[in-house]
Amino acid sequence: MASFSVLSVSILVIILATLVFRQQRPSKLKQPPRLDETVPYVSNALQFLTNKKVFMTRLREALDASQIVQCRLGPMNIHFVTGGNNVSAIFRSSFTSEPWILSVLRHSGGYAPKDLAKFAADQSGSAHLPRSGTTAKDRSLPAPEERIWHAKTRLHDEALIGPRAVDAFSAAFQTFFGDQLTEASPVGKWVEDVRIFDFLRQNMSTAATRSALGSRIFELNPDLTEAFWDYEKYVESLAFGLPHWLSRRAVRARDRFRGMCLKWYEDADRQFEWDGGELNEAWEPLFGSQVSRGLARWVKSFDFSADSIGGIYALFLFGLNSNTVPICTWMMMEIIRDPELLQAIREEVSQAEVIDESEGRSLDYRKLVQLPLLQSVYVEALRLHVSILITRTSVEPVTIGGFNVPAGSVFQAPTHAAHLDETIYGISSATGYTQKWSQLRYSLFAQAFPHLVITFTGIYEYEDADQPINTGGTADHPANEFWAYRHVKESEISDALGHTTKRREFSMAGRGSSFFPYGGGISMCAGRNFAKREVLIAVAMIISRFDVEFVDWIKPDGTHSERSAWDNSGYANGVAAPPDRDMKIRWQRLW
């Protein structure tokens, strides 16, 4: 045994010495600085796995000194980047997220090897035109009908971005979440001990799942919601591909949930009339939405195995709920804890209320998503609580941040490094121009899941060069704190008689390249419109239908907490971080 230990240590020393030697060899390429660590190639990887919050704090400090920092995490040498230009660069076509997506599909989704091989064989990319470098003579270029990456992207574009699909989801979600709210509380009666995060986890995710996949899935799997949240907490750790003996509980949770999804799919597929009129329905009970039926057609066209089919829908539901529920929770917590903000949001939401004699009261969801203060609170929740590492691999040699980096290099952009930048969101100002925004596009976190990504396109109009532009921060509202009005500005409007009135406008002026909570480029997931509608509808429905009073902050075991909620550190850099405390409230439904 002793000789075995000596041999093991000797091998480890040789490996480390080889790595250090390789790192210290002269290179023709100028190398970015490395993140310090006590034991080379060990300390940073260990801290990343065991205490990501501390790791990210150290990384953020290093990125303050250099906008590109190298770090080896296990077998991978990562280039961490920050800065608007550098982050924008990794969203270009010379970078791809496909290697990371394949890892997610394999480990988090449990895809079958034969189906993973279909993705790996398709080197043409997701864009409409095949990736640069592939030609008709290149055997790696599949026929158009075999381009699996492009087919998946096209499905998302058609079924998640299009206005008809988004409106159908919005209408269904408003109906089903309304049913959940009606069941939760009778009109005119105060209900005590409501826990807002727990309530949204159960009811918001149930309504969203029913809106997307139909009602049949719950008839077959009554405990689907509980199984989903058990699976959800393991998706990130599964993606790294740890040996099964280290992740038995995670694998069991994954297999249980994808088994439920497969059971539903096979039942719905048997009953659904694929040649009938329901194929183009906005919603029907077996498959639910257009995107769900589109996924089923995609599954059939590429002949996916049963294991992969369960994983496809498991990851779809992960994308649907894992970000929206925490973000909605943070919005509700910030609004409820501030009575003045609660009243301001209630007054603003009333502008989107519609009263119909036959259908009663509802919300105009198109108007709702344009409300400036509500949008500002939404963006603040995203900015502060989405902490992810957006991962791309260079497909060709690239120059970024002044460094020449070879093809195959892995880059990660930590959102928090940009989202907490005081020069962008804190105590600073700029001069020379104002920006009038002509287009606002929302899109989702895309590593492999349909979620939310937000990008902004601006038209610059030069005006008074001496007038500073507030970038959203003051001495009272530093970048690391929530401020509901950070993305709201007031403007004066004059009528024909010269009378002026003030109105609020939502603005992200000067921050477009420093706000990327869920990615960017061709790999952005297409569910952005679904997610924004869902979150804002849920917030507005609660605010407009209930009198709400804050009671207490509580720990997960239900006992009193001396502090308010913080980000749950177990979710650092995976998805939107849920709160580590819940907010106990009491409410009374008004209608």
Image (cartoon, helix red, strand yellow):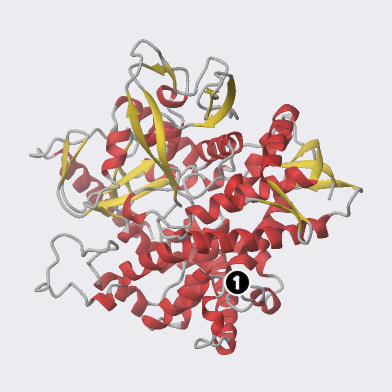
Is 201 rendered above or below residue 338? below
Q: What's the residue at 33%, 39% (across, down)?
A: 39
Q: Looking at the rendering, in which quadrant would you find the N terminus?
A: bottom left
Rendering quarter of residue 103 = bottom left
**Residue pushed farthest right?**
189
Is any part of residue 80 visible from this angle? no
Residue placed most toward the observer, 62 or 397: 397
Q: What's the residue at 60%, 72% (across, down)?
A: 283
Rendering quarter of residue 455 = top left
Left/right of residue 567 with respect to residue 546 in the rendered view: left
Residue kind at label 1, given as amino acid type: Trp
Is 583 rendered above or below residue 255? above
Residue placed most toward the observer, 9 or 263: 263
Q: Is mark 1 on a helix, strand or loop?
A: loop
Residue 96 x, y percent position in the rendering: 28, 55
Residue 306 x, y percent position in the rendering: 47, 82
Is any part of residue 533 visible from this angle? yes
Q: Name the residue under label 1.
A: 283
Q: What's the residue at 26%, 48% (across, down)?
A: 92
**Residue pushed farthest top?**
466
Residue 565 x, y percent position in the rendering: 66, 37
Around disc 1, counting alpha carbons within 10 Å, would you say few (fewer than 14), some (14 to 19), or many (20 or more)? many
Is 209 rendered above or below residue 563? below
Residue 127 x, y percent position in the rendering: 28, 61
Rendering quarter of residue 209 = bottom right
